[in-house]
Amino acid sequence: MLKIPAFAKRQNVICHSKSESVKQNTDLKKIFNHFIFRIQQGFRIFNLNPKISLPILLVLGALVAVKLPSNYYYPAIFFALTLTFHINRKDIPFLKKVFVKNWRLIIYIESAIIYVLFILGNINYKIDKLGISLFFAIILFSFFYPKAKPNLSLKWNFIPDSLFEFRSFLRKNTWFAIIGYVIIVLSAYQTALLIFVGIFILDYFSNIYEHNESKEMLEMYFKKYSFEQKLKSNLNFFNLLLLPTYVGFLIMNYKDSIFLIYYFVFMNLYFSLILTRKYKIYNHKEKTNYYNMGVYLEYFFCSITIIPAIFVLRENIKTAKRNIKLYVGS
């Protein structure tokens, strides 16, 4: 049996250690490049898509300023938000392929950074044991993740046919609608939170009326209902959804009830402008009415100042009724 010389063994050990060192350096470089990409991705989203960035900035602003009755609420809420991000991420299979051994570390670091930004960002929170404990609990995120999104899709059949835009939107966005509605109701806790969430959520209410129905559907609808009936029924349903928020705010902030009156007027004016705009520019050849951030900002500032919104709304209603007549007749 041939014996391997000692120098050859040493040479093998050296070569092996060198290859391991090169591999570790490659892994570290890959991880570093991944986080550089994440930073660039964040800036790209904020620069190119104001429809996403504006609501995010408003929510972050609310999270920075909001004051809760107990210090323990902050880490619990921020942990829940971080968990929501983790559950909804779609890149875990990709991370497992690219970072074969380090994908769990990537998940932990990304989730931990989000949690820490929330914790350190709030001006009213003082770091406590619960906050630190939940930071380490984020390690568990690396060991569970949804392999498929839960298929929660309700029929929403209790919503009448006359509110078909609401029903269609809720069927397609069940998860988002439920989470969003909980946030709207909870916003009644504080005046600043009510305003921030109201501004944020209006953009998503606008999406309900972004798509145009077919010419046949429009004709069928407006032969049965007038435009005033449509506007009234949609406004009634809109305010029914906001009713728990109105009541909750009155109970918890009765001294600031004047803000609720303004909130009610502002929200209803904006909602009416968006709905009437849909039929003002309706064209059966177009699938959407091209709602964008420019429309949001225009109607937002009109509604804040109230008087301009009333004039714009009157013109919208007049033009919308005239446009509908082209399809339905008198």
Image (tube, rainbow, N blue to C red):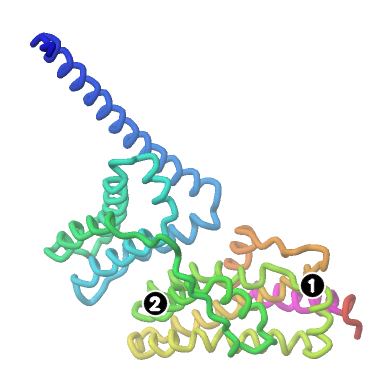
Please give left or right for residue 73 compared with residue 269 in the image: left
Magenta span includes 156: no
* Residue 215 % position (x, y): 83, 73
Q: Residue at x 38, y 72 (%)?
A: 192
Mark positioned earlier in the residue sequence (2 or 1): 2
Task: Indicate left or right for 170 with 213 as reference.
Answer: left
Q: Position of residue 253 (x, y in %)?
A: 34, 85
Q: Which residues are magenta?
A: 307-324
Q: Is residue 61 left or right of residue 23?
A: right
Q: Which residue sits at x=31%, y=45%?
A: 103
Picture quadrant where residue 137 is located: bottom left
Q: Secondary structure at mark 1?
A: loop
User: Which residue of the protein is positioned furthest toward the left in this rendering?
Assistant: 6
Q: Is residue 36 visible?
A: yes
Q: Position of residue 203 (x, y in %)?
A: 56, 67
Main SS type for the magenta part?
helix
Residue 179 numbered mark, or none: none
Return the residue at label 2. 187
Q: Secondary structure at mark 2?
A: helix
The answer to which of 55 and 132 lies nearer the viewer is: 132
Q: Is the residue marked by circle 2 packed among few (<14), some (14-19), or many (20+) residues within 10 Å?
A: many
Q: Position of residue 323 (x, y in %)?
A: 84, 74
The structure residue drawn at horizontal position 24% and vertical position 69%, both measured from the top left corner, is 76
